[in-house]
Amino acid sequence: MTRMADMALSEGAVDFIDDAYLTGLVEKTLADAGRVRELLAKSLSKQALSVEETAYLLAATDDDLVEEIFETARELKRNVYGNRIVLFAPLYIGNECVNDCAYCAFRRSNKDAVRRTLDVDETRRQVEALENKGHKRLILVFGEHPRYDADFIHDTVRTVYETKVGHGEIRRVNINAAPLDVPGYKRVKEAGIGTYQVFQETYHHETYAKLHPADTRKGNYPYRLDALSRAQEAGIDDVGVGVLFGLHDWRFEVLGLVAHALHMQQRYGVGPHTISFPRLRPAQGVEVDYSHLVSDHDFKRLIAILRLAVPYTGLILTAREEPELRREVMAFGVSQIDAGSRIEIGGYTEAGDAQTQALEKEQFELGDIRSLDHVMRELVEDGYVPSFCTACYRLGRTGEHFMEFAIPGFIKRFCTPNALSTLTEYLVDYASPETKAAGEKLIAAELEKLEDGELKTELIKRLGRIRETEDRDLYF
Ligand code: SAM
Ligand code: SF4
């Protein structure tokens, strides 16, 4: 491990990504069906895999063995996480940016980008529009710019929480913004955030250097790699890692993500809460090397392998992907998706539900621009329980987020009842008649599955209160 150059890094920071070693694992690990099956059994027993073990799963290319990997990921998802899917929406606050990431339409050299930052009133109006659709969880997205400093992020989060309309309120605000220093993270934490996400984009040093010019803030690889360790030092124990797939060999990147998760786990006793795996999308004026684009088949492999390698970490799938594929990979263990998303700044009030996209105002093109109601209906018809639950973080059940994974009965006691309560709120307050009918049917079926007892009686009482009174936000 290389000691990192001093630039306000976390205590004892090291660069734990060894390109030559990870590349060697990708290139030299031989296909071994017996070993793969042993590892699948290990994952099913809820143990995380090492990078070396993950490399065996990556080396499996035979169709039947890949199908076994898919099936094991489905089984892990079914047995451990059940059929809940958490829903959120992204809210782009501003696209000013001092960086020049080759793949992003917000890069400073893109002179055609229409630059805009929402002011407080505009932010409120976007939030109201999202609340009126039924959203309860947002991720705020920022370019990297001195004006988007820790105070600005803090104040924006406060504005979001304070904005309420009817029964609408945002109960959890996550952040996707530039890395901060420790005091900066502390300031943002004071606003009561959920997860702070920073994607490494690519763990491969040479590729990173090519895509992020050295004279930009983001050009500093070690500073970015250390971003979430600084967040931990500042007391933010809920962090999200990610890779922009398509910049370098996807198998190397999977190993990078696993190495990062293990590093966090070892250092702080808690791994990342979530992993994001966006695939590179077309963006305004972007011409990068597309030779590493990930096919749909490999994308499914990488999601299934991540599910198995880091079984206790949430997986986030975004609307960059097309609806059909989203539907398929959800079964592999995706735990969160966004829905009804607009990534044009001001898009929730100004673009409405129009199926049009204005490229000069967007960071990249979306693959799924269906409404929240449409996505909700499809989910419930497919037997998923869409959830807007925010209970754990509000009750201080964070950090040890793998509770739901590791503590027997946790999902039954907390997650399922909370998912059904928040779904009922949605159906009563926001759903179309068709979604409402489909959702009520699903709730009845889920209640049927619950064991009789105090918890079930209390839950049924609460669902009745939501339907018949103004009571909301009832959680376990
Ligand atoms: N500016 C901050 C940063 O770069 O970390 C945070 C916001 S940035 C708008 C959020 C993420 O968008 C980036 O981390 C990157 O992974 C993703 N992104 C950028 N360009 C993209 C593209 N063309 N297709 C898909 N995702 C992209
Ligand atoms: Fe700026 Fe982030 Fe886009 Fe890079 S990815 S140009 S830092 S907004």
Image (cartoon, rainbow, N blue to C red):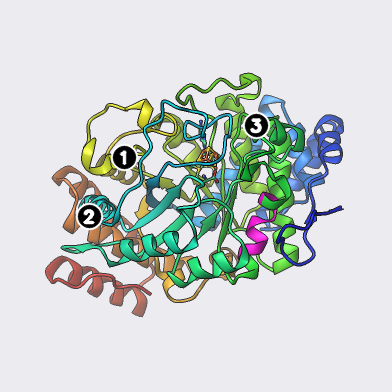
Q: Position of residue 234 (x, y in %)?
A: 60, 70
How packed is label 2: few (under 14 Cα within 10 Å), some, or many (20 or more)?
A: many
Residue 123 visible in this rendered orientation of the protein: yes
Front in this rendered view, residue 326 or 457: 326
Identify the residue position indicated by label 3 in the image. Answer: 211
Q: Is residue 340 left or right of residue 203?
A: left
Q: Position of residue 326 (x, y in %)?
A: 44, 35
The amino acid type of the residue labelled 2 equals Glu
Residue 447 visible in this rendered orientation of the protein: no
Q: Which residues are magenta?
A: 224-231
Q: In the rendered view, would you say 248 is above or below 169? A: above
Identify the residue position indicated by label 1 in the image. Answer: 378
Report the number of discs.
3
How packed is label 3: few (under 14 Cα within 10 Å), some, or many (20 or more)?
A: some
Front in this rendered view, residue 77 or 243: 243
The amino acid type of the residue labelled 1 equals Glu
Identify the residue position indicated by label 2 in the image. Answer: 128
Front in this rendered view, residue 213 or 241: 213
The answer for how far apart the CA atoms under marks 2 and 1 are is 24 Å
**Foreground tag (2 vs 1):** 2
